[in-house]
Image (tube, rainbow, N blue to C red):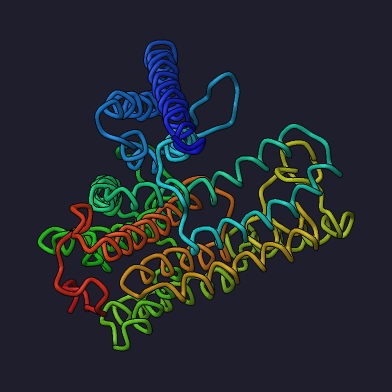
Amino acid sequence: MSANAMRAPLRDRVADWWAGAWRWSITAAGTVVAIYLLLDRAGNGALVTGIALAALVVGAVLTMSKPLAIALMAMPALFVAQRAGMGGADVSASDVALAAAFGTAVLLGHRPYSRELRAMLWFNFGYQFATLLTVIVNPFVQNAVEWFHAWLLISGALVVGWAIGRVGYARWAFSAMLITGCVLAAGTVIWGVIQYAGGNFGPVYPQIPWAMHKNFVGTALAFVALIAYVHPPWAGLSTRWTRPALWLLLIAIVMSQSRQAWMGLVIAAIVIALRRGGRSKLLLALAVPAVWLAVSMVLEQLDSQNRHNSTFQRLEWFREVYAYWKHAPIFGHGLRFWYVDPTLPYQPPQAELEVIASAGLVGLAAFATMWVGFTVVLSRVDKAFGTLALAAVLSRIVQAQFDLFWAGVQTSVPFVIAGICLGALALQRSADSSGTTDAGLAPSADLRGTLKPAALR
């Protein structure tokens, strides 16, 4: 027996041991924290976080018989932005769920990664290496913590999505996201109707099922709407429920009056239409109200001369961030500098401004390179699998031109979606090379065809 053959069982036993250790660690930690939050902490946020962590515990138990159940159970929790409040740490339930899913994906996910996923991970590594310089130059705790957090939000989310898609759970993951999105959308619509009945036709800040900012709910639901609209054939999503889900999501986004969500959806719809080589009715349905909404609201706020509205406030923020950046132009002031520096005690509401103030020109160059790399890689992916991934990722960077970029839910979800698409593509390639039909992919006569969506056709 060769040395390699003898080492293989040992590697398998070590991998099984680590997988079991991780599963039991998640089970124990999740149980303790969930009970603590539910019994000791008051408030709706504690309840929501406790439920999210309890879902991870269920996933850890299921992992004993079903690989990657933790990662799959984390999908709904990715949309919970409430703060976990564990030991004073400023982390959200979404961050906790993503970290647990990442650990599971690393230990139990398929190897090797596809060339597309590796390319995206390398582009993100380049950005992380560049921002490591600002961590060294600006030594404070939040700076170092955010460096790891930012890596998790992109590379961690990609790995989680890849593991789910590669093992054949794309349908279940997308279904979990759609159900969660519909719950949030229904709450937004209900709260909006109550608000409109009182004569207030402004943006809706839903309080059902928990309190959410209009821009959070708008941008988060935009990603789910893309899943419902594209519903790629390989995912096996039925149009009998994705079609009404899409309309519910769009109505909720309109009621939120989130301009960045609409602009992101318009760009995503353009990408989908171009990659399918035809016109998109959704593009027309989105473009007209989106442009009208954005332009009319900005003009109204400019005409009002109210220095405290969102347009004037953003212009003032841009001026302040630019003046602040000039004091550390090369390496910036550090990630999450607003936690420790009272000079500028807020997160810049625009992606590139935040990066240049945090990581300087070095970080901005790496950030731009990363996004160009992501776009090039995903644009070259088979259209049947790459269209949704490209649309979701580009939608995120468009949204971030008008608001925060490094925000947990809004950053991680599109990259989880992209990872699922890349994992499903790798699964299809594996099935093709082995000459078998894998049960993880939905049966379809033409998985790679440029099929138009049934919704809004």
Q: How many marks?
A: 0
Q: Is residue 413 left or right of residue 88?
A: left
| Residue 424, picture quadrant | bottom left
Nearest the viewer among 227 and 126 is 126
Asked if residue 198 can be seen in this view, the reply is: no
Residue depicted at 36% across the width and 81% down the height: 275
Q: Quadrant of the C terminus?
A: bottom left
Q: Quadrant of the N terminus?
A: top left
Q: Position of residue 5 (x, y in %)?
A: 44, 37
Q: In the rendered image of this protein, does residue 131 appear above or below residue 366?
A: above
Residue farthest along the right direction in this orientation: 327
Q: Is residue 156 left or right of residue 320?
A: left
Residue farthest along the bottom direction in this orientation: 278
Residue depicted at 82% across the width and 53% down the height: 332
Q: Is residue 243 left or right of residue 227?
A: left
Nearest the viewer among 152 and 431 is 431
Asked if residue 334 can be seen in this view, the reply is: yes
| Residue 222, picture quadrant | bottom left
Residue depicted at 63% across the width and 64% down the height: 370
Residue farthest along the front direction in this orientation: 1
Q: Position of residue 175 (x, y in %)?
A: 23, 50
Q: Position of residue 328 (x, y in %)?
A: 88, 54
Residue depicted at 37% across the width and 59% down the height: 223
Q: In the rendered image of this protein, does residue 42 appear above or below residue 328?
A: above
Q: Position of residue 349 (x, y in %)?
A: 62, 56
Q: In the rendered image of this protein, does residue 10 appear above or below residue 233?
A: above
